[in-house]
Amino acid sequence: MSVTVVIGAQWGDEAKGKIVDLLSQEADIVGRFNGGDNAGHTVVNQYGTFKLRLTPNGFSNPRTICVIGPGVVVNLATLIAEIETIRQAGISLDGRLWVSPRCHVVMPYHPLVEGIYERAKGAASTGTTGRGMGPVYADKVSYNGIRLADLADEAALAEKLGVQLKVKNALFKLFNIDELNLQNIIQEKQAQFAQIKEMVREPFGLVQEALRKDARIILEAAQGSLLDNDWGTYPFCTASTTIAGGAAGGLGIAPRWVGRVIGVAKAYTTRVGAGPFPTELLDQDGEALRQAGAEFGTVTGRPRRCGWFDAELVRFTAQLSGMTEVALTKLDVLDGMPKIKIGVGYCPKGHCKSDLPGSEVRLAHYWEGDARWLEAQEPEYIEVDGWMESTKDVRAFEQLPKLAQAYVRKVEQLIETPVGMVSTGPEREAIIPVPR
């Protein structure tokens, strides 16, 4: 089985892009199967530093074909800008980038609709990126979407857009937002489409032929498993399917082809936007993690919420996607921590063992409740000693401080999944295999 799926094991921002960039050096195809330009991947390689939102992270290997599957929604302006950035770095995507014509397109009204809902929710707002993901996926599943294929036919596009603007402009009027003009949108989108037209072609046949030849295929997820629309902390989640099973529909690869599922997790935990976060640190330790890890959103620039590693969450997402291994990133961010905690389960606030010494408390699992239930829980921790040494220039697992090695082994024991690699810096060569 020649297919590897790389997914986020937490709430996103786990450095999936770096892992995919590493694996892509031996890949024939790298494909995206979900999400849109609401999540960014930062990659550092021999060509420079790239902050990409849509282009698959196989772009730096001239032998790798990059595929954007129909499960992805495309913001044309973002894709065009990324293609130009990659070209300016001296990398050609000619003949190497395939974008499915089945991809739905982010239209100018989608961010506006999202903004209306966020304002209407007030203090209960979801904390979205403002890229319009929810509304574009809502249009998709309610048969109101515009796909890339529609942009090639002006008459069909005008008909579909006319229907959408009747509804959207009526909504905008209620909220004192200027109406959108049909012809202006048609002109804008067709001009953008013309710039990528040669890359819009259905990759299904290409992928199926690659599977028959046992080619090496990497499937790259956007966002993290805990933002999944079904299994995440709904409604504080994303609009797409972010777990390994989403690759089947999002790119057209049957599950039987998948032989390896890598879950990427930070050595601590972060989250952007609203929603429950049991191990969040609102103290100097949380700020120390934020500064040491440069925890600011690639897309939004917002400071990320930071906290200790939550083994209960990662054990759940490992089971959910059948992870064969975990890539533990940003281990070096913990270098300055004298004591490190790991969350191992939950109990009602004020009723954990640490609150009631000597008591026997049953620890609950993430999957037992919803977001409101999780807000009412607090984590039970175990504490380990920090290594208080720099790991940034270490390039072999056995050369890591003994306490850092012990931390990795404790994590894999708690999540019941092998840690296959750790990273101690943003560079590709800072990814270290973990011996079995």
Image (tube, grey):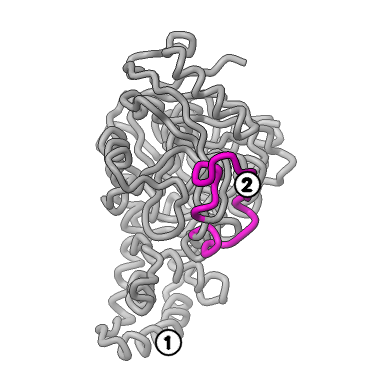
Q: Which residue is disc 2 drawn over?
A: 361
Q: The disc labelled 1 sits on which kind of residue?
A: Val
Which residue is nearer to you in this view: 242 or 270?
A: 270
Residue 67 screen position, x and y as percent:
51, 44
Lateral position of residue 335 relative to residue 414, left or right:
left
Q: Residues within 10 Å of mark 2 (few under 14, many from 20)?
A: some
Residue 178 screen position, x and y as percent:
25, 84
Q: Residue at x 62, y 36 (%)?
A: 261
Label 1 sits on a secondary structure element that is: helix
Query: Earlier along the polypeptide chain: callout 1 or callout 2?
Result: 1
Lateral position of residue 295 relative to residue 30, left or right:
left
Q: Residues within 10 Å of mark 1 (few under 14, many from 20)?
A: few
Q: Which residue is disc 1 drawn over?
A: 167
Main secondary structure of the magenta stretch: loop
The residue stretch that appears in magenta: 349-375
Q: CA distance from mark 1 to mark 2?
A: 53 Å
Nearest-to-viewer mark from 1 and 2: 2
